[in-house]
Image (cartoon, rainbow, N blue to C red):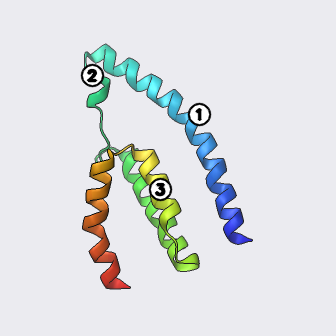
């Protein structure tokens, strides 16, 4: 039951995030256009406070899921969707982190 509730929460979060993301993307695009920058040049950075908080939040959720169900991937996937990292960058990060986490298990 608790896994079902967690998946329902993830679904609800994704719905709200999609709406928020559309609004945020529209604001960022208009700001970047006003500054003369290209919208594609914006990337995920932990130096931005909201991105750092999101990374910490998803890390805590992944740790909770790992301890409770031994499956941290839903939180990691939510982070990947939020951060909009390129596929190759995400794979490289996971390949670097995997040996550290496996050695702890």
- Residue at point 61%, 48% (across, down): 13
Task: Mark 1 or mark 3: name the one nearer the start of the chain.
Answer: 1
For marks 2 and 3 on the same chain, the one whose residue lies earlier in the sequence? 2
Q: Secondary structure at mark 3?
A: helix
Kindly indicate whether the residue at mark 3 contacts the one at mark 2 (C-beta within 8 angstroms).
Answer: no
Query: Is 79 on the left or on the right of 104, as rendered?
Result: right
Of badges 1 and 3, the one in the foreground is 3
Q: Residues within 10 Å of mark 2 (few under 14, many from 20)?
A: few
Q: Quadrant of the N terminus?
A: bottom right
**On-image quarter of the C terminus:** bottom left
Q: Secondary structure at mark 1?
A: helix
Left or right: residue 51 versus residue 74 is left
Point out which mark residue 19 bears.
1
Give the spatial CA distance, label 1 vs label 3.
Answer: 18 Å
* Residue nearer the viewer, 87 or 55: 87
Asked if the residue under mark 2 is in contact with the one under mark 1, i.e. CB atoms within 8 Å, the reply is no
Real-space CA distance between mark 1 and mark 2, rounded to the nearest whole angstrom: 23 Å
Q: Residue at x 33, y 48 (%)?
A: 87
Q: Is residue 2 above or below residue 81?
A: below
The secondary structure type at the circle numbered 2 is loop
Which mark lies nearer to you, 2 or 3? Answer: 3
Q: Report the residue that reaches farthest toward the right.
A: 1
Residue at (67, 69) in percent of width and height: 3
Q: Residue beneath label 3, please? A: 77
Mark 2 sits on what residue?
38
């Amino acid at each position: 039951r608790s896994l079902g509730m967690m998946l329902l929460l993830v679904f609800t979060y994704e719905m709200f995030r999609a709406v928020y993301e559309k609004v945020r993307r529209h604001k960022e695009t208009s700001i970047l256009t006003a500054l003369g920058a290209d919208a594609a040049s914006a990337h995920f950075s932990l130096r931005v406070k909201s991105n750092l908080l999101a990374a910490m939040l998803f890390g805590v959720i992944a740790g909770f899921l790992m301890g409770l169900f031994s499956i941290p991937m839903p939180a990691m996937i939510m982070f990947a969707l939020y951060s909009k990292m390129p596929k190759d960058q995400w794979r490289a990060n996971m390949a670097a982190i995997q040996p550290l986490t496996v050695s702890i298990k």
